[in-house]
Image: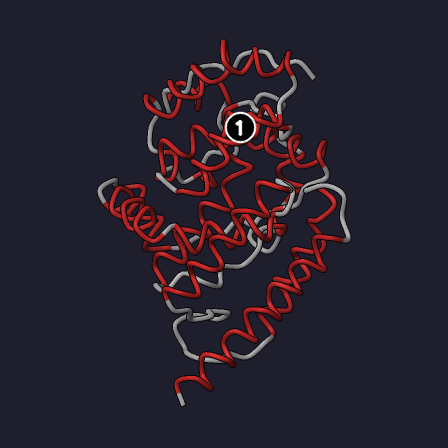
């Protein structure tokens, strides 16, 4: 019976990975994968639970299975950083202890506790992009809208959580994913390799997620000589200062700051202005 159940789960994991791979392999960059990620999310929400009622889409895995998934997804993430399916899997299978600490830090903050209790989500069913686009240029909401529009991104692009074995920690992981582009916006970092590495350092320091640390340490290997020098001399020290000195960004109710002046918000969160990036 145990062998049969394990085999069935492994087949399900294989099918999930194959589906994610097909979705992402049809794209050439993260931005063009947005519609496919949204398609997978819709598909997962429609599919009935297979094994338990922990939360919709949850796939229970043993420690051994998590180790295998972690190793495979880590290798593929390093080989191809645009594979958001593999990055998502790596975050879920290695993030248990970091997620517990993130949740505790959120509960210790009044706003963070409110977020945990209300579990808001950021997607096009809860957020009007037209509203964000109508805001003044100096607002945080308009900055986020510009970030999405310029890069062809969508709030619906974030993949659902499958491998986190706790409903509240599952939400913390989802919240982290859905606020990643907001981190880019408030930090003033474009989504190219240098900007991604800088944001990953901030996230690694603040969240402790192994997936973020992996990106922060190994991402610079893909930088060219000029960008690597800029990274070491300017952006790495800036990112470390931001991650260390700024407010815990997971405890920010971003949805309540759309109309706030961006500079005022950065000052409120103690975020040091970003260096000027070369395009």
Q: Seen from this angle, which residue lies furthest left?
A: 108
Nearest the viewer among 72 and 245 is 72
Rendered residue at 36%/48% (across/down): 115
Q: Position of residue 52 (x, y in %)?
A: 41, 79
Query: Is 61 placed left or right of 122 in the picture?
Result: left
Rendered residue at 46%/18% (across/down): 236
Query: Is 123 placed left or right of 254 in the picture?
Result: right
In the depicted structure, whether residue 19 falls above or below residue 78: below
Rendered residue at 41%/20% (across/down): 271
Nearest the viewer among 236 and 255 is 236
In the depicted structure, whether residue 13 falls above or below residue 185: below
Q: Position of residue 273 (x, y in %)?
A: 48, 14
Query: Is 241 placed left or right of 108 in the picture?
Result: right
Q: Position of residue 228 (x, y in %)?
A: 58, 16
Q: Secondary structure at mark 1?
A: helix
Task: State which quarter of the image contains the C terminus.
Answer: top right
Q: Residues within 10 Å of mark 1 (few under 14, many from 20)?
A: many
Nearest the viewer among 160 and 249 is 160
In the depicted structure, whether residue 207 falls above or below residue 48: above
Label 1 sits on residue: 197
Task: State which quarter of the image contains the N terminus.
Answer: bottom left
Tell me how many marks there are. Answer: 1
């Amino acid at each position: 019976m145990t062998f049969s159940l394990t085999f069935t789960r492994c087949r399900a994991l294989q099918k999930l990975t194959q589906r994610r791979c097909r979705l992402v392999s049809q794209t050439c960059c993260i931005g063009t994968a947005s519609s496919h990620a949204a398609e997978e999310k819709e598909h997962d929400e429609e599919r009935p639970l297979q094994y338990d009622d922990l939360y919709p889409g949850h796939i229970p895995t043993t420690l051994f299975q998590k180790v295998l998934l972690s190793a495979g997804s880590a290798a593929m993430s390093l080989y191809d950083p645009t594979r958001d399916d593999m990055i998502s899997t790596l975050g879920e299978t290695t993030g248990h202890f970091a997620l517990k600490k993130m949740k505790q830090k959120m509960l210790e903050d009044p706003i963070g506790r409110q977020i945990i209790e209300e579990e808001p989500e950021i997607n096009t069913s809860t957020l009007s992009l037209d509203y964000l686009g109508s805001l003044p240029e100096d607002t945080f909401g308009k900055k986020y809208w510009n970030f999405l529009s310029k890069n062809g991104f969508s709030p619906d692009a974030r993949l659902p959580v499958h491998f986190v074995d706790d409903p509240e920690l599952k939400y913390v992981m989802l919240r982290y994913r859905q606020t990643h582009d907001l981190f880019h916006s408030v930090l003033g970092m474009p989504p190219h390799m240098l900007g991604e590495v800088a944001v990953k350092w901030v996230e690694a320091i603040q969240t402790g997620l192994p997936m973020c640390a992996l990106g922060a340490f190994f991402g610079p290997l893909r930088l060219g000589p000029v960008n690597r020098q800029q990274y070491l001399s300017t952006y790495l020290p800036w990112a470390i200062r931001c991650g260390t000195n700024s407010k815990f960004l997971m405890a920010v109710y971003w949805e309540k700051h759309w109309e706030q002046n961006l500079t005022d918000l950065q000052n409120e969160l103690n975020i040091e202005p970003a260096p000027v990036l070369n395009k």
